[in-house]
Each structure stands twice: as structure tokens, then as C-alpha cells.
Image (spheres, rainbow, N blue to C red):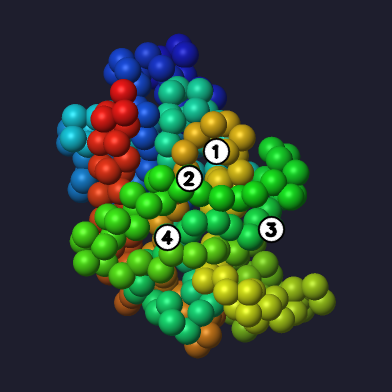
Amino acid sequence: MSDDRLYHIGFGPSDLPSPPPAFAFLSGDPERAERVATGHLDQPRLLSDHRGLVSWLGSLDGHPVLSSTSGMGGPSLTIVVNELAQVGVQAIVRIGTTGSIQPHVPAGAVVITRAALCRQGAAADIAPVEYPAAADPFLTVALARAAADAGITAHVGVTASVDTFYEGQERQASSANPNLLRALQGITEEYRNLGILNYEMESGTLFKQCSVYGLAAGCVLAVVAQRTEGEQVLLDAKGTAETDAITVAVAGARRWLADQTRST
């Protein structure tokens, strides 16, 4: 490790090439971060696994790229995004998992989040509640076009981004706590009626933070639960959905990097 390493991510500018990576993939799961790096980047090498926050460095079409993990939830993500910005990252695509709340978005599908209903405490430390939680439009279009080119059906829409997996997503049957606050009882149906596609736990904070920091942010999600049918994670659908989400994210990154090269 270098002497200029950041406290949480465990690496610093002197561990990176010059110019540093402008693009980072961000996964909650360290195994997914490794899968992106070793399966899709050229010459991947592990930079750090400090505090369990795994980061890999590789290249994509000649551009240096990071594949890192954010941990679970907004508070951990804010730390990683802050420190990635400090080492020069300018664009981030989250690759995550999600539960659909719409019948037309099945388990095994892919969601591209264009904006989030942000019900997250960490985001409130960065911007007011009213501040929009929106993905970068150019990065979102790049992801949608990448999905279309790959023949992957991607549902583009609004995500409910909340802080908790059980109470916040109105899980009762699979939770140790069957007693939901009254404000959360019926919240899934309410969100469904608003046209919201899905639940997850990071995109709202990511979008607000990146907007405030002047970074581009996008989000591609693998649908691993169908909440109109039940609360459980469907492991048989997870593999295909994750593969498709990674494919879309990597192809979208290629488009974004190529666009940046043409514009400079």
C-alpha cells in the first residue's frame, strides 16, 4: 500500500496509473466486483481488500477502470464514493440486485434506474430531501442502448431506494420483526401505484452524492425477487440476471468512455 492511501478503500493516487481511472463499477457484493474485474477487464489486479472493501484495477478498451465494492446500504456507499472521487473517478455505475414490485418486471430481468425515490438517511447529510435523486442522463442512455444491442430486455424506470432490507421494503413473513410501523404498512402497493418498478438500497444516495460532487452515475440491477408473488430471493434467477446486468454495465461503460474520448 502507498503512503497516500485513503483510509477506507485502502489505496491512493500513487497506486494508480496516470491519468487515473475515470470510471468505476460499484457492487455491493465483493464477489461481484471480482467477477466484473476478472471476467471483463484486461489485466485485472487486486488493489485492496481493506475492511472488506475490495477494489480491482484493470482496463477496458485501453482505459483504466476500477471495479470496487461499496458494502451494503447508503452510509457505506457514501464513504467509498467520496474516496473514489478523491483518487480521480468521474463516473460510477452501480451493479446491484433488486426486488421487483411490478408484475411486468419478472425475476431474472434487468432494471436500469433513471431516478430514485430516495428514502435514505445518508443522502440527507449530502443534500436536502427535496434534492432530486436522478441518474446521469447520458450514462443512462448508454446503458439502455447497450442492453438493446445485446438483446437484453431492460426495464428503465424509477426505483424505491430505502435504507433497510426487511422493514423498509415491507417484508413481514421473512423478517424477525412482523410488526411494521403504520407508515410502512401498504407502502409497496402505494409505490406500485406510483409506477415505481423495484426496491433496492443504494441508488438514491449514489445519485444525490454524485450529482453534488459533479460525477456521472448510473445503476443497473439484477431482479432477484418478485414481490407481487412473495418475499424470498429467487436464487435460480439470480445467476442469469446478474450476468445480464454485468453485460449491460460493461457495454454501457464502453459507450461512455468512447463518448468521452470523442469529446476531448
Q: Earlier in the sequence, mark 2 or mark 3?
A: 3
User: In the image, what residue type sits under mark 3?
Assistant: Arg
Q: Earlier in the sequence, mark 1 or mark 2?
A: 2
Circle 3 residue: 119
Q: Earlier in the sequence, mark 4 or mark 1?
A: 4
The label on residue 109 is none
At x 53% / y 77%, what residue is drawn? Answer: 101
Residue 194 lies, with reference to residue 1, above or below; the image says: below
- Are the two marked residues, 1 and 2, in contact with CB atoms closer than 8 angstroms? yes
Quarter of the image where the C terminus is located: top left
- Whole-number angstrom distance, CA of label 4 to CA of label 1: 17 Å
Report helix, strand or loop for mark 3: strand
Residue 202 seen in the figure = no
- Whole-number angstrom distance, CA of label 1 to CA of label 2: 9 Å
Circle 4 residue: 112
User: In the image, what residue type sits under mark 1?
Assistant: Cys
Circle 1 residue: 210
| Residue that sits furthest to the front in the current view | 263
Nearer-the-camera pick, 33 or 215 = 215
At x 80% / y 73%, what residue is drawn? Answer: 183
Classify mark 2: residues with Cα within 10 Å, few (<14), some (14-19) or many (20+).
Answer: many
- Whole-number angstrom distance, CA of label 4 to CA of label 3: 19 Å
Dividing the picture into quadrants, the one containing residue 122 is top right
